[in-house]
Amino acid sequence: MKQQWKHLKLKPFVQFDHILRYEKNPDIKMIVLLGEVGGSDEYEIVELLKKKKIKKPIVAWCIGTCSKVFPAEVQFGHAGARAGADRETADAKNKALKEAGAIVPNSFEDFDKKIKQTYDKLVKAGTLKPQPDVEPPRIPIDYKIAMRDGIIRKPTEFISTISDDRQEELMYCGIPISKVFSDDIGLGGVLGLLWFKKQLPKWATDFIEMVVLVTADHGPAVSGAHNAIVCARAGKDLVSSLASGLLTIGPRFGGAVQGSAAHFTTYLYAGEDPAFMIKDMKKKNVNIQGIGHRIKSVTNPDVRVEVLIKYAKKHFPETETLDYALSIEKLTTRKRGNLILNVDGCIGVLTCDMLRSIGYTREQVKEFVDLGILNAFFVLGRSIGLIGHIIDQKRLKAGLYRHPWDDIAYMMPDKPEKVK
């Protein structure tokens, strides 16, 4: 054992200096020793007891007394201790300690009793004054057990009210995915569940799918498609190229769906007539989003708008926002023929009417508008076309795009301004 400690460059716990330090410490009233089979360190304690250098009661026991029942030598303890001679057996050590004056039990089972008896004698003699028990640390209950038994509730970081994938079957707003297919809910129905948390009637789901179809693409020249194409030709991946195109959606491209809904509902719900809205927005120097088209006009109408209006008039229970927007269009087209209700504006006002028709109040519709989510219809539809353009350019192996010089008006100053 000594050789093991020497190899580790550590001092064994049982040494003269430790025991003598305990003997000299007035706060220590008794010593407890737990030795083991093998080695001879315990005999150092025996010598200290014989020389009366340890006067405090010492309760001792060396484990490994069972080694004698084994037919061959057996290792014990964390260091693999074993008796190399009779003197190193646990029985020999326990006998020597007892003869030297240590308090040694008859077996390990009595070790705690001897400690308690020694303690009680010291207390009775007034040598030791009992100290208040230290409150043991409370071991917390296992989290899984507590959750199972309903003892605790873990605070959550997210709330989901539209889908749940914890069960055997995925749920869309409480509807199993198998039922989505068996009932032929379709794309519009799924959007109704995930966006509005409602099982929409067929006229509403068909309208949503119509919006997706009419917004899917508008050629390669518009902002979103142009960005996606340039990005794809620069060698970027599909997702990056799609993001590049989607990021162009805003007040001037596609984002008028949101803007038109906000403009028209603000004045309609406030009870203002169309003429007041036009006059008031002109006074504020704000263009009415959803009104105006670069190419289409009264004499050259947008077929997409005509299809949507015809469908809404036939199937929507409520078209108050559309009617208000068409009244605005009658006034704006008197000034200029291309100041018509465009497709973005038409989708914006019809979405408000769809929400009203499926049971939302004006206040709730306004909340949807204020949340800025109506552009979701344009984003969803246009993503289809943008992805198509990206795939098209990848398939064509189109090279890096560089804008032609003759399409750029270079207007350089003769000399740069010199700052003093």
Image (cartoon, rainbow, N blue to C red):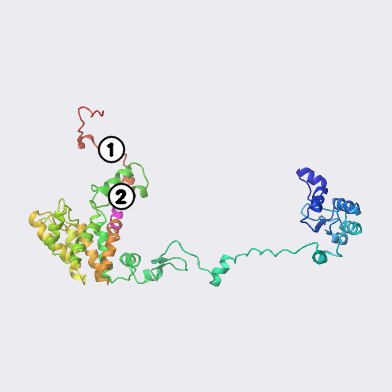
Magenta stretch: residue 76 in it? no
Residue 240 x, y percent position in the rendering: 36, 48
Quarter the C terminus occupies: top left
Spatial CA span between label 1 and label 2:
20 Å
Q: Position of residue 89 (x, y in %)?
A: 88, 56
State the mark number for residue 402. 1
Residue depicted at x 78% and y 56%: 28
Q: Nearer the viewer, residue 239 or 107?
A: 107
What is the magenta segment's predominant secondary structure?
helix
Q: Which stretch is magenta?
A: 380-387
Q: Nearer the viewer, residue 108 or 300?
A: 108
User: Which residue bears the numbered disc 2?
Assistant: 247
**Residue 63 visible to an observer of this rendering:** no
Which mark, by number, is residue 332?
none
Q: Is residue 382 magenta?
A: yes
Amino acid marked by disc 2: Leu
Residue ID at (85%, 50%): 41
Callout 1 amino acid = Arg
- Between discs 1 and 2, the one toward the N terminus: 2
Name which quarter of the figure residue 108 lies in: bottom right
